[in-house]
Amino acid sequence: MKQFSQFSLRQKLLLPTVIIMVFCIACLSFTLVSVQKNQLNRLEKSVKNGLTRSNNVADETYAELGKEVSHDLQLMSNALSASIEQTCRESLEEEKLRLEAELNSALRQSAESIANLLAQVAPPAILSNNFLDLIGYAKSATQNSDIIYAVFMRSDGEPMTRYLDRKSSQIKKYLKLGEEKNKVLRVIAASRKDDGVMLMEKSIVLEEKVLGSILICVDKTSSKQKVAALADRFNQLILNNTQTARSVVDEESAKLSISMSQMLKNVAIQSRAEAGKIEQIIIDISNAMRSKIQFIVLTAGGMSILFLLLILYIFLTRVTKSFGLIASDLDHRFKNITSASRQIASISQKLAKGSAEQASSIEEPPVLSKK
């Protein structure tokens, strides 16, 4: 305090003012840096949270995409298998119909050949009324497992021969279905209504004269059985091909699904890595901005302090000069007043002394002269 009291007026004014200014600027800088730091921290947290949410959403999206891809691949596998099965079934069905038609055609040709043969050998027996030979021809024809019966017919539609294989299940069935009294006609009528047989009738002609006809009933069961067996093989082939195709497609789909899942995982990992890099970049930028702001604030604060000190120094210098002039003038006036006071005091003393002498002279008695 004694040292401070020895400072000049300018120093006394400048020192507290500088301290206050430095304190205020330091508080302002600290506040500004703190606020900016909080803002940067909020921005950093916001960006980090945004990146985290984005990564979580991306992971969920990738997972959902993987499920959708697996589901779509399964649907594609099912559709492809169904398409292959449908295509194979249609192709094999066409082939089955073609083979059935070929078998029926071959059966028809065989029946027609037998009918032609019987029509050629029958005229002598018919002309000679040799029914035993006709019956023998009919029996010979039924030796073929596909022929149910063979009947020689007259021109008026009546049967010449009555031979029927009573052991045949088809003959037994026809005998039960028909209503005609003639068993042969009953069998013929029933067979005409049966879609499972084929009737082949050939006229017996000799020298352009119709002697009758040969009627052959051909059973299409064998051809149907062959077609059914072929259809079973076709169905088994379709099932095998479908299962093979499904297995291959499922295997490839599983490989593709695994590959896409791994790819999506790699993308997610890369996304997280890139997000981490972005986060680190933001942190680095935030730190750089924080350091730069601190440097700018401190530099600006220091320059402001220096500038204010300069202005204050100039201002206080002028003020102290003015105060010095005023003090010098006051000192001069004070000296004049002091001198005048001393003169007045001297005069007052002199006046007081003169007054005292006058008073003493008045108080002395007057001296009377002797006459």
Image (cartoon, grey):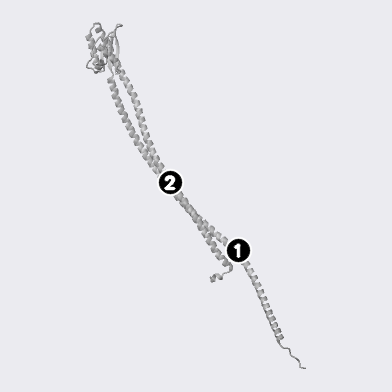
Q: Residues within 10 Å of mark 1 (few under 14, many from 20)?
A: some
Is residue 240 or residue 37 the one in the foreground? Answer: 37
Mark 2: secondary structure: helix
Farthest bottom residue?
371
Is 86 on the left or on the right of 136, as rendered?
Answer: right
- The disc labelled 1 sits on which kind of residue? Phe
The C terminus - image quarter = bottom right
Residue 78 percent coordinates (x, y): 36, 33
Rendered position, 306 above or below 267: below
State how many labels appear. 2
Residue 265 percent coordinates (x, y): 39, 43
Rendered position, 357 above or below 184: below
Is residue 209 or residue 228 the one in the foreground? Answer: 228
Q: How far apart, in angstroms, are the residues tagged by discs 1 and 2?
A: 60 Å
- The disc labelled 2 sits on which kind of residue? Arg
Mark 1: secondary structure: helix
Q: Residues within 10 Å of mark 2 (few under 14, many from 20)?
A: few
Whether residue 272 is visible, yes or no, is yes
Residue 217 percent coordinates (x, y): 27, 15
Which numbered marker is on residue 242?
A: none
Q: Which residue is mark 1?
A: 315
Is 27 on the left or on the right of 243, as rendered?
Answer: right
Q: Residue 327, located in which quarter of the rendered image?
A: bottom right
**Marks 1 and 2, the one that precedes in the sequence:** 2
Q: Which residue is mark 2?
A: 53
Q: Residue 129, located in which quarter of the rendered image?
A: top left
Residue at point 54%, 57% (across, down): 300
Residue 274 percent coordinates (x, y): 43, 47
Residue at point 42%, 44% (across, down): 57
Whether residue 109 is visible, yes or no, is no
Is 133 on the left or on the right of 30, as rendered?
Answer: left
